[in-house]
Amino acid sequence: MASHRLLSVGVDQRGIALPLALILLTLLMSLTLAFLTMGSSEPTIAANLKSGEMALAAAEAGIERAIWALANPTVDTAGANTKLTDLTNIPAPYSGGTLFALDGSRAFSVTITPGAAPNTITAHGYIVRNGVALPAQSTGLAQSDIIGHRVVRLQVSGGGGGNTVGGPGAGATGGDVKLPGALTVAGTVQMAGNSTVDGNDSAAGTPNTCAKKGGVTIRSTTNLPDNACPSPPCSVNNSVSFNGNAYALVGTPAQQSLSYSDYSGYAFNSGQLAALKALAQAQGTYIQPTSNQQFDLTVVDGLMFVDTVNGQDLGTPPDASKLASVKITGASNSGWLVVMGSIRIDGNVTYNGFIYAHNDLSYKGTGTGGIYGGVLTGNVIDSVATVVDTDTSGNSKIYYDCNKVANGGGGLSGSVQSGLNRVIVSIVPGSWREISN
């Protein structure tokens, strides 16, 4: 009987429900309180996250503002005397002290630090509490009023007035133009027939006011591709030659030869050519040939850009089959004409502005026409057999007018004029980073 009673006590569950219920109730209350606590903090977490992302966006807006200012050194981008032409003397709005307000609660400050090669841009993005008035100076922000603050830093190349889209021909006035004179050639020049190249005058008997007044400027040598010489590297000397006695070569100096390094500042680089192409595309004056066969070009006013065949890069070494080839037999226009290849001018052609041939130019004019502005050829395809890179013969006249180079003889729209004077600013790959505030 005693053992039966002990077994009954061991398996009897009467009275256990209440403790279990109390335990479960305690657990449920703990979970409820935890969820309530989390629920009450979620809006704060979300608000902080939102403020942080808004501050990051404001900082990136500061980066964009600095890049825009660097790309437009001829413009006061943040009030009077804020041009970024001289990066050794950064104006106050771009030295971190000024607060640029985006709206009532968002703002940024930006610092441009010039470097030997890349320039560094550091931007602070701020979000302030509701009802806080944004001060004009970043130092006027109280820490207690800031609810979001992020800092971004990156490096850029360009800025400060160099490497403009329009290269040596860009400028608000003729005094800004860096061309050395009337005809600038990276190869050999041959003058013949009744031809004139005049660096002193903007027209017959009319002296120009240009800073430089060269007649013909050539690059002293041309490097040949490896397959064009027996023992690479090879180069050929360039020269100016004459045929007959009817030509006239005038300038100060009449002709000059520059070394590779001295000449390089006059050549368009790939970034400038890409920017010129984009400008022409925006204006509807872009032409893309489908073959390298010569075609008749109808010239229009403004910036014209004739691309390589199918718009492809020339490669290294340059592929001659991709060069465009245009022929102009009659025109009376103003602007800039850029051809990624060769230009042949035959006939009564008058052009006021700037003509650029990525390879070479053959100019045999007739009638009363002439080029009033400047001419530059890049001569990217050269060989020993190419003895005439630029042929100015017949009744051909080139008069140097730096003002017409700068403004395209009055044929450039305001947007194109601004675009030519814009500086190419490029972000250094891998330099973007967020830093601690």
Image (tube, helix red, strand yellow):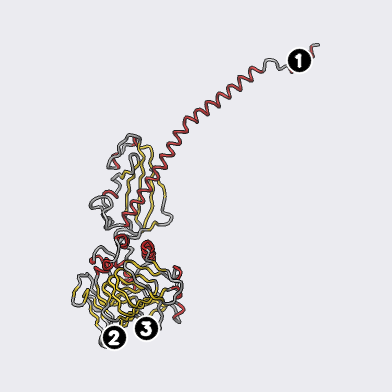
Horizontal and vertical percent position of residue 301 = 31, 68
Q: Which residue is mark 1?
A: 8
Q: Nearer the viewer, mark 3 or mark 2?
A: 2
- Tag 1: residue type? Ser
- In the rendered image, which quarter is residue 8 located in? top right
* Crowding near the residue tagged with mark 3, few <14, some 14–19, many ≥20 C-alpha atoms within 10 Å: some
Q: Nearer the viewer, residue 399 or 429?
A: 399
Going by the picture, which residue comes out furthest to the bottom? 244
Q: Which residue is mark 3?
A: 387
Lateral position of residue 331 relative to residue 202, left or right: right
Q: Is residue 69 visible?
A: yes
Contact between marks 3 and 1 (CB within 8 A): the answer is: no
Q: Is residue 316 above or below residue 247?
A: above
In front of the other: label 1 or label 2? 2
Which one is in front, 191 or 138? Answer: 191
The image quadrant of residue 364 is bottom left
Say whether disc 1 or disc 2 marks the residue closer to the N-terminus: 1
Instruction: Find residue 9 and report its horizontal and vertical position in percent.
Output: 74, 15
Count of residue discs: 3
Vertical arrangement, residue 295 with respect to residue 11, above or below: below
Tell me the SS state at disc 1: helix
* Amino acid type at mark 3: Val
| Callout 3 secondary element | loop
Residue tagged 2 = 193
Mark 3 or mark 2: which comes first in sequence? 2
